[in-house]
Image (cartoon, rainbow, N blue to C red):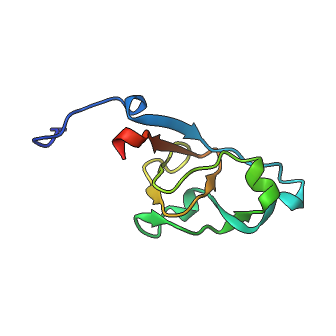
Amino acid sequence: MKVPEGWREVRLGTVGSIVTGTTPPTADAENYGPAYPFVSPADLSNGKYVSSAIKGLSDTGWTKSRQLPVGAVLFTCIGLIGKTGIAAVPLATNQQINSLVCDSRHV
């Protein structure tokens, strides 16, 4: 694939951190609730920006997750590969999603 004029090809790790999602223990119902979106691949089908999810985390679950900031780029890495989105709100993802959190100098 040709790189557009004015662009340059770089490795993702040079512009930010790659974060793999994690799932707080599902046996503990206190981890789940409406406080924060808990994104899975099914939530990456409704447009470019992700601000909600089918499932949510409680404040307790949020502390056990890998928290992602607004602007994190989400992409599926297991199952249906190639679905993408951009975090419009702070959120967490399950382990089927990797995310790129750009360094402040690349935002």
Judged from this view, the residue extending furthest toward the front is 105
Query: Left of 93 or right of it: where is 34?
Result: right
80 or 34: which is nearer to us? Answer: 34
Q: Quarter of the image for the N terminus: give it.
A: top left
Q: Residue at x 39, y 33 (%)?
A: 12
- Can you give x and y, in whole percent of width and height, for residue 53 in the image? 61, 67
- Can you give x and y, in whole percent of width and height, for residue 69 in the image? 54, 52
Identify the image quadrant of residue 31: bottom right
101 or 107: which is nearer to us? Answer: 107
Judged from this view, the residue extending furthest toward the left is 5
- Can you give x and y, in whole percent of width and height, for residue 11 in the image? 35, 29
Q: Residue at x 47, y 42 (%)?
A: 100
Q: Is residue 10 above or below residue 84?
A: above
Query: Left of 59 or right of it: where is 66?
Result: left
Query: Left of 34 or right of it: where is 96?
Result: left
- Can you give x and y, in whole percent of width and height, for residue 3 in the image? 17, 38
20 or 59: which is nearer to us? Answer: 59
Q: Is residue 49 above or below residue 23?
A: below
Q: Residue at x 45, y 54 (%)?
A: 71
Count the numbered circles shown.
Answer: 0
57 or 44: which is nearer to us? Answer: 57
Q: Residue at x 48, y 43 (%)?
A: 101
Q: Is residue 98 above or below residue 32?
A: above
